Image: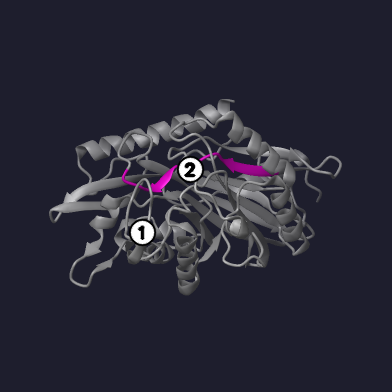
Amino acid sequence: MKHTYFWSRLLLVLLIGYSGNACLADYLPGDGLPLFQETIERSDVTLAAVGDVIMHMPIIKSCYNATDNSYDFRPIFSEIKPELEIADLAVGVLETPLAGPELKYTGYPSFNSPASIADALQWAGLDLVFIAHNHCMDRGIAGLEKTMAHLDKIGISYVGCNNRPDVKRYRMVETKGIKLAFLAYTTSTNGIVIPKAKQWMVNMLDYDEIAADIADAKRNGAAGIILALHTGIEYQRVPSNEQKQIVNRLLELGVDIVLGSHVHVIQPVELRTVATSEINKARTCFVAYSLGNLLSNQRWRYSDCGLMVHLKLTKYRGEAAITITDKKLTPLWVNRYTKDDKFNYRIKLVQDAPSTDPDVDLEGRLRMKQVWEETMEMINETVKK
C-alpha cells in the first residue's frame, strides 16, 4: 500500500529513536529527516566527534610515571571510551605537536607533548585525528614530521597535514560500504611561516583547494564530506560573522558536516537545508561551529567543557549521498581533582542527574549541573532562531 507523505514521515520519526546515556534534546533547527524510502535497503554509519585536545603542562605532569620515565594518559579518557567505541568512526582534534622529548615538552603558548597522548586517544576509540590547527607548527617542520611519523607508526588516521606532496589532502574512510571523505583546514599557524617549499604540508583554508578535494573525493565514490574547520574568535560563545561566511561557503561547495574547533568554548550546532543542482531536491547538512574542549587545563567557565556529537549517517539504495537520520549530543566536563598529592584529570559525561563520582566534589557537581543547563540553553536558543 502506498504511504502518504505525512504518515511516512511520522513512521520514520518513530523508528529512528537513538538509545544511550542521557543527552540533549534531539531537536535542532531544520528538519534532517529524509523522505520516506519505499525500500528498507540501507546502510548506516555512526560518526562520533569531539573537540580540542589541548595538552597544557599540568596535564602532562599529572600522567608522568617516574619509575619508567613514561606517560600514560589513558585514565583521562576512561569514562568516554565506551561512548566513542559504540560509533563506527570517531574523530577529534589533536591540538599539539608530538615532536619528542629532544625538543622539550611544553604547554601554552608553544606546545609539544608526549606521543603517548595519541596512543591514549586511539585506545579511547578515536579512529582519526585532525591536525590542521594554529599550533601544528609550534615545533616547526621537524616537529610536524615527527607528529605524522608517530601517527603512522601506531596506525591512527589523520588529516590536515601531509608528509609528502604527492598525497591527497583528504582522507577517505570506508565503513559498512559507505565512503566518507574527511578534510581539515585551519586559518592560522599563529604567525609561524610555513616555508614556501613546504606549503603543501599544512592545509590552510583555501576554497579552490577544498573544491578540488571535494570533486576528487566524489569521483572516488565519497558519499559524505566531513570537514574540520579550525577558526574563530577564542572564548566567544557565538560564531563570528567570518565563521558564518566560511561555513556558508563550505556548504555551497558540497561539505555535508562541518566540525568546528579552536575557540575553546561550545558554540551552537544546527541542521541546515542546502539547495542542490537537482530540481526540488535539497540536502541536510550538520554544522557544529565549535565542539569546545575535549581536554584542557582551562578551568574557567565555558572552557572547562566540550560537546560530543553522534550522527547516524544513512545511505539508501540508489542514492549517491548520505542522509543524516539521527543525532545525539552529550556535554562533557573535565574534572580536575587532587589525589596522591598531584592533579588528576577525568573527562566526565554530563547528564541531567547529579554525579555520584566520589572524586567530584560539591563544587564540581554544581559545575556539571551548570554545564548541562548552559548547553541546553544554547541548543534551545539555536532552535528558536
Height in image: 169 above or below 28? below
Tell me residue 34's x, y (percent): 71, 46
Residue shown at the point (58%, 36%) measured from the top left: 28
Left or right of 23 on screen, residue 104? left
Local crowd size for mark 2, using a 10 Å CA cut-off: few (<14), some (14–19), many (≥20): many
Local crowd size for mark 1, using a 10 Å CA cut-off: few (<14), some (14–19), many (≥20): many
Quadrant housing residue 166: bottom right
Which residue position holds label 1? 113
> How is this picture coloured?
one colour
- Front tag of 1 and 2: 1
Magenta range is 284-297
Tell me residue 52's x, y (percent): 44, 49
Quadrant in which the C terminus appears: top right
Q: Nearer the viewer, residue 101 or 211?
A: 101
Which residue position holds label 2? 262
The mark found on residue 154 in the picture is none
Q: Nearer the viewer, residue 382 or 204?
A: 204
Q: Is residue 295 magenta?
A: yes
Local SS, label 2: loop
User: Residue furthest toward the right?
Assistant: 279
Q: Amino acid at mark 2?
A: His
- Residue 314 visible from this viewpoint: yes
Local SS, label 1: loop
